[in-house]
Image (cartoon, rainbow, N blue to C red):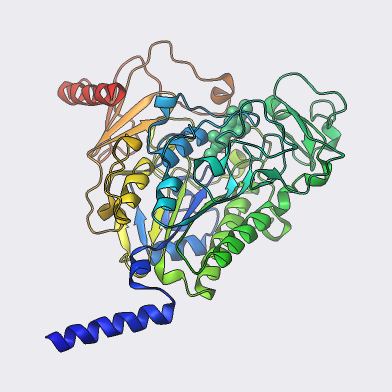
């Protein structure tokens, strides 16, 4: 027996030695969070996509765990990302979609997910879309923009400051604008127009390579009009068609540079958010026009990351979390004919709703975890929220009690790693109304005089409002068509009570 044990230890040491890991490191996988923007449950092949192929994501799912009932914390970007990084619900901080000149919304004294990982010995990096605000509200883009990622736990950052459709359209590395010429300083405004600024799409539609609605007719850079006005920084402007390559190469460099010790990479894609301007390599890669083409482009980038890990022999001990920040949307403001070309493809899978909606498709998003050394391939129906990644990863890394620091985050590491199919008992869905899940029950809280910004209703979005309680049984009615609230008053009371406990916490 003893001999066997010693043999085992020697073998493990040999294997880990070969892979360049110590025993301790084996317990500390590299963690790569691949965070796609606006990708719907049904937008990947493995979940039923028909208009586009996603071979790299499908392979990731086949070799990992594909979750059928995992949710982002909210149906829009900023709230969702706020919850992901803080383990706290967005409503506690009134987090809403931010403009490109908004200040950082994470309190820098907060102990965040990247802080926790740093404390556990990780080098932390964020590459891609940020959209959590930067600076103090009076941001000068021509000097170090602060506070930002470094002040909330990231050792390295390379950012799209807000969204692809908002100025400033420049990359920011370690909080400095990349390639900025000091002689050509940047100015940004979301209120008054700026003199001698970039022409606007409203005044110069002839400059546009893709038309846009009334809300996206501000500064034109690279032939695309954006939200907001901008002046200067011409040597720093990004080229939309190159963005996927720039970000993926930056992510690869981060991996390469940090290959010898545990790292956390939050790779936050611009794809498949609008403006959907695919690189020429992906034009007509799908049958759905630009929206499908950028899904194919995004899938290719995912494959590049996997290839890099394989090349560096890191795949075995890297936990890849692939997911999305909110549900899908066809028309969000640019005229790329996503609605007209969607055909039989169902971006939200069998679920009702979209981005901005409290119905299931608003937050039930593609979620795949892969860690070849540890996770057995399969499918999991566990009910999980991204707000739980914080406490779950903390638990994995032996920081057992993030406690008050992440008030809404629950430890479900066993569910994330596929050791159990049991996830949350209750799960909050934040949109412009509140939804609550318990097993297959879905409750939507009634709202009096509910409104959403006008542009949402113009986009064929059903936000899910009603002045009456709504209760659906997702097992028999995944499309949320038959309101059972009057038939199950006790369930409505239980769900309402639980919501109130969450609000009062
Ligand atoms: C909305 C924008 C939309 C998109 C969204 C953010 C208008 C009319 N629409 O306010 O274009 O940028 O915000 O998307 O301004 S998200 O995925 O980052 O939440
Ligand atoms: Ca989004």
Is residue 14 shown left or right of residue 166? left
Q: Position of residue 324 (x, y in %)?
A: 47, 46
Residue 436 versus residue 1: which sits nearer the camera?
A: 1
Residue at the farthest left position:
1
Residue 338 versus residue 9: which sits nearer the camera?
A: 9
Is residue 473 shown left or right of residue 393? left
Is 415 above or below relative to 102?
below
Q: Position of residue 274 (x, y in %)?
A: 63, 40
Toward which corner of the image does residue 401 lie, by quadrant? Answer: top left
Looking at the image, which residue is at 32% across and 67% down?
374
Is 244 above or below relative to 441?
below
Looking at the image, which residue is at 18% across and 83% down?
5
Residue 388 versus residue 145: which sits nearer the camera?
A: 145
Quadrant of the image containing the C terminus: top left
Quadrant of the image containing the N terminus: bottom left
Is 154 above or below relative to 449?
below
Q: Position of residue 330 (x, y in %)?
A: 57, 38
């Amino acid at each position: 027996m003893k001999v066997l044990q010693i043999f085992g230890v020697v073998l493990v040491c040999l294997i880990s030695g070969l892979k360049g890991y110590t025993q301790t490191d084996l317990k500390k996988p590299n963690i790569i969070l691949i965070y796609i923007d606006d990708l719907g449950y049904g937008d990947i092949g493995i979940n039923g996509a028909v208009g586009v192929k996603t071979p790299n994501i499908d392979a990731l799912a086949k070799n990992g765990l594909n979750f059928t009932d995992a949710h982002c914390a909210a149906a829009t970007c900023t709230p969702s990302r706020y919850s992901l990084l803080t383990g706290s619900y967005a409503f506690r901080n009134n987090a809403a979609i931010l403009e490109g000149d908004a200040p950082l919304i994470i309190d820098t004294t907060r102990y965040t997910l990247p802080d926790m990982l740093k404390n556990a010995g990780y080098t932390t990096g964020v590459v891609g879309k940020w959209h959590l605000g930067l600076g103090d509200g009076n941001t000068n883009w021509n000097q170090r923009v602060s506070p930002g990622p470094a002040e909330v736990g990231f050792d390295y950052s390379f950012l799209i400051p807000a969204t692809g459709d908002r100025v400033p359209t420049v990359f920011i590395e370690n909080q400095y604008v990349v390639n900025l010429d000091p002689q050509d300083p940047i100015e940004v405004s979301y209120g008054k127009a700026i003199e001698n600024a970039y022409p606007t799409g409203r005044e110069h539609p002839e400059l546009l390579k893709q038309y846009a609605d009334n809300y996206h007719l501000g500064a034109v850079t690279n032939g695309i009009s954006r939200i907001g006005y901008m002046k200067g920084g011409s040597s720093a402007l990004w080229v939309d068609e190159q963005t996927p390559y720039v970000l993926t190469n930056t992510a690869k460099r981060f991996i390469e540079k940090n290959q010898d010790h545990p790292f956390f990479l939050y790779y936050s894609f611009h794809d498949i958010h609008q403006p959907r301007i695919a690189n020429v390599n992906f034009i007509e890669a799908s049958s759905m026009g630009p929206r499908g083409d950028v899904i194919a482009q995004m899938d290719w980038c995912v494959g590049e990351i996997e290839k890099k890990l394989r090349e560096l022999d890191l795949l075995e001990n890297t936990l890849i979390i692939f997911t999305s920040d909110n549900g899908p949307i066809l028309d969000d403001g640019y005229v790329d004919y996503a609605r007209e070309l969607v055909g039989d493809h169902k971006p939200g899978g069998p679920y009702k709703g979209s981005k901005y909606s409290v119905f299931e498709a608003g937050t039930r998003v593609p979620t795949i975890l892969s860690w070849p050394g540890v996770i057995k391939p399969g499918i999991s129906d566990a009910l999980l929220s991204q707000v739980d990644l914080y406490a779950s990863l903390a638990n994995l890394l032996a920081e057992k009690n993030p406690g008050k620091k992440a008030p809404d985050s629950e430890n479900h590491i066993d569910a994330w790693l596929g050791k159990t199919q049991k996830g949350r008992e209750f799960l909050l869905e934040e949109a412009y109304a509140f939804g609550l899940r318990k097993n297959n029950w879905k409750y939507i809280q009634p709202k009096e005089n509910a409104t959403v910004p006008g542009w949402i209703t113009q986009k064929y979005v059903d936000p899910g409002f009603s002045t009456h309680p709504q209760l659906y049984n997702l097992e028999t009615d995944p499309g949320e068509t038959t309101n059972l609230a009057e038939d199950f008053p006790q369930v409505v009371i239980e769900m309402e009570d639980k919501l109130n406990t969450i609000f009062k916490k």
